[in-house]
Image (cartoon, helix red, strand yellow):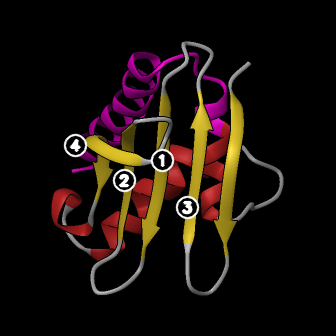
Amino acid sequence: MSSLVRERDDETQCWSQILFDSGERVLISIAGQPTASIKVLRLAFAGLIPVKTIWELTPAKVGGDDAFVHYFVKMFLTGQNETPRPLAAIRDALLKCSSIDSARRMLSERETLVKREENQRR
């Protein structure tokens, strides 16, 4: 199973670094200011340098702040008995993946399901 390398989740920083079974590393970064965003970035050079965004969720991408929160809840918190912190929810989902490709696929599938659900509601 993939593993957590390091993590920080406090009032100033919110990030987690994961080492996949494939040997690839990613950084999950959650920002609140100036614009809310969640990014998963591929890391290179022993996990020191982010080189490519493999997935991103922003209010602009999904239609505003309310939609951003809705997407996050539907993608990562649906079906959970207790509500974890946002970073923990994303981290736990990605730890089940074995590579960047499988993580990208999982994130895209979850995002697509929420989009379809939204389109059916309209």
Residues at circles 4 and 1 in contact by the CB criterion of under 8 Å: no
Pinpoint residue 95: horizontal percent, then vertical percent.
Answer: 66, 31
Q: Earlier in the sequence, mark 2 or mark 1?
A: 1
Label 4 – label 1 distance at C-alpha: 31 Å
Viewer-closest of 66 and 85: 85
Label 2 – label 4 distance at C-alpha: 24 Å
Which range is magenta? 93-122
Instruction: Using the image, determine if residue 94 lies above or below residue 21.
Output: below
The numbered dot on residue 39 is 2
How many residues crowd around disc 2 within 10 Å: few (fewer than 14), some, or many (20 or more)?
some
Residues at circles 3 and 4 in contact by the CB criterion of under 8 Å: no
Quarter of the image with the N terminus in it? top right
Residue at image coords 75%, 47%: 80
Residue 40 part of the magenta-drawn span: no
Q: Secondary structure at mark 4?
A: helix
Q: Which one is closest to the eye, mark 3 or mark 2?
A: 3
Query: Is 120 displayed left or right of 109 in the figure?
Result: left
Residue 114 part of the magenta-drawn span: yes
